[in-house]
Image (tube, rainbow, N blue to C red):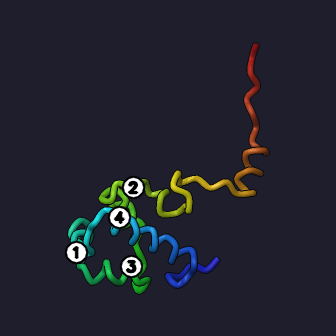
Amino acid sequence: MSKTIYSDEYRRIIDKVRQARLTAELTQEEVAQALEIKQSLVSKIESCQRRLDVLELLELSRFLGKPVEYFFYPSASGRVKSPLRKSLKAASPRKKKRG
């Protein structure tokens, strides 16, 4: 997996950040004020010219009223059923019910 701001994974996260901002009908300037950064940095983040810091993402999620998980998963619920998740669930020890 590529760990750069040019990766598809990073682009998807930033697309969700931008979409959440637009859905909330906020300007880049309003987001910048909430994060205490310049509007030009918000623009650079949204155009993948600057990496979004994890603490900035946390603050942004609070400001936009979205759980952090929202930005990482494609589904609205924030959950993805993947083969790995199913395998982990199947392999986990289950508690037996006592009768």
Name the N-terminal-most of marks 3 and 4: 4
- Does residue 93 appear to the left or right of 74 in the view shown? right
Q: Label 3 is placed on what type of residue?
A: Glu
Task: Name the image quarter holding residue 35.
Answer: bottom left
Residue placed furthest toward the top? 99
Q: Residue 46 carries which label?
A: 3
User: Can you tell which of label 1 and label 4 is closer to the viewer?
Assistant: 4
Tell me if residue 46 comes above or below residue 72 in the rendering. Answer: below
Q: Which residue sits at x=53%, y=54%?
A: 78
Helix, strand or loop under label 1? helix
Q: How far apart are marks 1 and 4 (CA)?
A: 15 Å
Helix, strand or loop under label 2? loop
Name the N-terminal-most of marks 1 and 4: 4
Q: How far apart are marks 2 and 1 (CA)?
A: 19 Å
Q: Label 1 is placed on what type of residue?
A: Glu
Name the N-terminal-most of marks 3 and 1: 1
Q: Which residue position is annotated with label 1? A: 29
Instruction: List x then y, in percent, for residue 14.
Output: 45, 73
Tell me if residue 85 comes above or below residue 20 in the rendering. Answer: above
Q: Identify which residue, 60 or 25, lies in the foreground.
A: 25
Q: Distance between the residues labelled 3 and 4?
A: 15 Å
Q: Which residue sits at x=78%, y=44%?
A: 90
Q: Which residue position is annotated with label 4? A: 23
Q: Residues within 10 Å of mark 2 (few under 14, many from 20)?
A: some
Q: Which mark is residue 66?
A: 2
